């Protein structure tokens, strides 16, 4: 029957075809909508290590899989980053840069390559002149183990909450800043009102939360390491006849 509604070499006669389709297929109930498709990386089961040999500054980085920024533990990751790498009183600066002089810079961060879906928490350092990446690695691991085995101090946790609240309030002082924050929370949570609930999430972070997250996430099997090893540049090519 349908063939008779489509002329050879001609277009479809929609007015004649649609009633036929409705008659035979309209009675079939619609199925449930397909669920949203999110590609989630399977759990990592062993450490991965990437070594890039290059005639450049050595560099050390290690990352750990973590949940999306909408996860209840995100504020705890923010606390860890603040305690490890916010300013010259931070643990990484005092240990690696000031005291041991192993690095010229060291810091941690979360949200790579994006915050909306599961991502990475990472810590990195630029070794000082004459320092091997392995020395930096050992020093970084020592600070991570401290988070797993010892409570952070009341002072460190209080400083984090004070700075985080101040940073949030400063970001809202202008119309542009307010618009950016509202749009960001709408993008992440699907609800701009979460911006005004973020203070509560910061206040609820405890020392026990920091230890729990550190032990859950900072595991060998969940770690990826990437380093730049400095090598001599290749010899320059000479022109023929010289």
Image: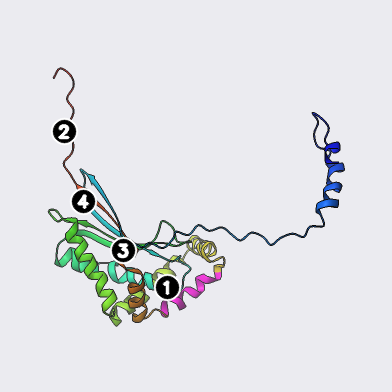
The residue at which mark 2 appears reads as 235
195 falls in the magenta region: yes
199 falls in the magenta region: yes
Are there few (<14), some (14-19), or many (20+) residues within 10 Å of tag 1? some
The dot on residue 108 is 3
The residue at the point 28 percent across, 80 percent down is 151
The residue at which mark 4 appears reads as 58
User: SS of the residue at dot 3?
Assistant: strand
Task: Give how far across and how far down residue 150 sits, in percent.
Answer: 26, 79
User: SS of the residue at dot 1?
Assistant: loop
Q: Are marks 4 and 3 in contact (CB under 8 Å)?
A: no
Q: Earlier in the sequence, mark 2 or mark 4?
A: 4
The residue at which mark 1 appears reads as 73
Q: For this view, does 33 lie left or right of residue 22?
A: left
User: SS of the residue at dot 4?
Assistant: loop
The residue at the point 16 percent across, 41 percent down is 232
Q: Earlier in the sequence, mark 3 or mark 1?
A: 1
Are there few (<14), some (14-19), or many (20+) residues within 10 Å of tag 3? many
Q: CA distance from mark 4 to mark 1?
A: 33 Å
Please say whether residue 90 is visible from this viewpoint. Answer: no
Q: Relative to 171, say whether 133 is above or below.
A: above
């Amino acid at each position: 029957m349908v063939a008779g509604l489509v002329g050879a070499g001609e277009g479809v006669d929609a007015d004649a075809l649609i009633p036929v389709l409705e008659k035979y297929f309209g009675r079939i109930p619609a199925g449930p909508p397909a669920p949203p498709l999110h590609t989630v990386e399977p759990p990592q089961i062993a450490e991965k290590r990437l070594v890039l040999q290059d005639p450049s500054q050595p560099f050390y980085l290690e990352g750990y899989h973590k949940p999306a920024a909408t996860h209840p533990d995100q504020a705890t990751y923010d606390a860890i980053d603040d305690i490890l790498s916010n300013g010259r009183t931070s643990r990484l600066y005092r240990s690696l840069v000031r005291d041991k002089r192993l690095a010229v810079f060291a810091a941690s961060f979360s949200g790579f390559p994006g915050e909306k879906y599961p991502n990475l928490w990472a810590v990195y350092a630029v070794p000082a002149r004459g320092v091997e990446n392995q020395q930096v690695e050992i020093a970084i691991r020592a600070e991570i183990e401290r988070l797993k085995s010892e409570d952070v101090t009341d002072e460190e946790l209080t400083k984090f909450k004070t700075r985080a609240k101040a940073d949030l309030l400063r970001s809202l002082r202008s119309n542009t800043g307010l618009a950016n924050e509202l749009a960001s929370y709408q993008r992440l949570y699907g609800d701009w009102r979460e911006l005004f609930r973020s203070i509560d999430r910061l206040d609820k972070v405890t020392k026990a939360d920091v230890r729990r997250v550190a032990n859950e996430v900072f595991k060998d099997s969940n770690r990826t390491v990437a380093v730049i090893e400095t090598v001599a540049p290749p010899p320059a090519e000479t022109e023929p006849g010289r």
